[in-house]
């Protein structure tokens, strides 16, 4: 089990995408059994229902598959308080701050996300990496 890697919702969703390169990268990251938060699971369900037009059964089945391949951390009061601190200090959105806070509280070293600044270091410990970044 690799608990020092955290993944954002976009990485989870790329496992379903049509871009074969990104799909392969996303699936290899999930194969490492990373951490993610209950927020990430719920955001993925929402995107599956709204954008991908999944049935509820399909969306919840996908979420179940993801949960079986990862380690899920609940968003709790401590996470919300930490996310407020992150949002105020770094000016991230509320939702990104929740993901970052969960990763920090889990003592992760890496947060994989396509939506945040590649190579940014948060609190001197957590590095945000875009796994699809090509220089």
Image (cartoon, grey):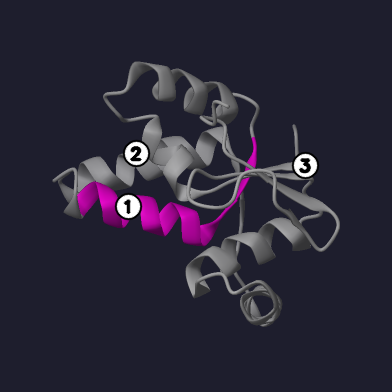
CA distance separating discs 1 and 3 = 24 Å
Q: Earlier in the sequence, mark 2 or mark 1?
A: 1
Q: Which mark is residue 62?
A: 2
Q: Which mark is residue 4?
A: 3
Q: Which mark is residue 85?
A: none
Which residue position holds label 1?
45
Residue at 34 percent of width and 39 percent of height: 62
Task: Please determine whether, in this image, residue 65 is positioned above or below residue 106.
Answer: above
Range covered by the magenta-colored residues: 34-49
Q: For the residue labelled by badge 2, is the local secondary structure a helix, a strand or a loop?
A: helix
Q: Quadrant of residue 17?
A: top left
Task: Please determine whether, in this image, residue 119 is positioned above or below residue 103.
Answer: above
Residue at 29 percent of width and 57 percent of height: 46
Q: For the residue labelled by badge 3, is the local secondary structure a helix, a strand or a loop?
A: loop
Could you tell me residue 48's position as x and y percent?
Answer: 25, 47
Could you tell me residue 35's position as x and y percent?
Answer: 65, 45
Q: Is residue 87 magenta?
A: no
Depth order, front residue of 77/25: 25
Residue at 69 percent of width and 44 percent of height: 119
């Amino acid at each position: 089990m690799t608990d020092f890697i955290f993944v954002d919702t976009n990485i989870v969703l790329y496992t379903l995408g049509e871009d074969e390169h990104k799909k392969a990268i996303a699936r290899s990251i999930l194969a490492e059994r990373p951490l993610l938060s209950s927020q990430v699971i719920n955001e993925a369900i929402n995107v599956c229902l709204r954008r991908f037009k999944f049935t509820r059964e399909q969306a919840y089945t996908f979420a179940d598959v993801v949960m079986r391949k990862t380690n899920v951390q609940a968003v709790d009061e401590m996470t919300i308080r930490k996310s407020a601190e992150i949002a105020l200090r770094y000016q991230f959105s509320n939702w990104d701050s929740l993901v970052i806070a969960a990763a920090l509280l889990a003592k992760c070293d890496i947060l994989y996300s396509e939506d945040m600044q590649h190579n940014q270091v948060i609190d001197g410990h957590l590095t945000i990496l875009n796994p699809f970044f090509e220089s």
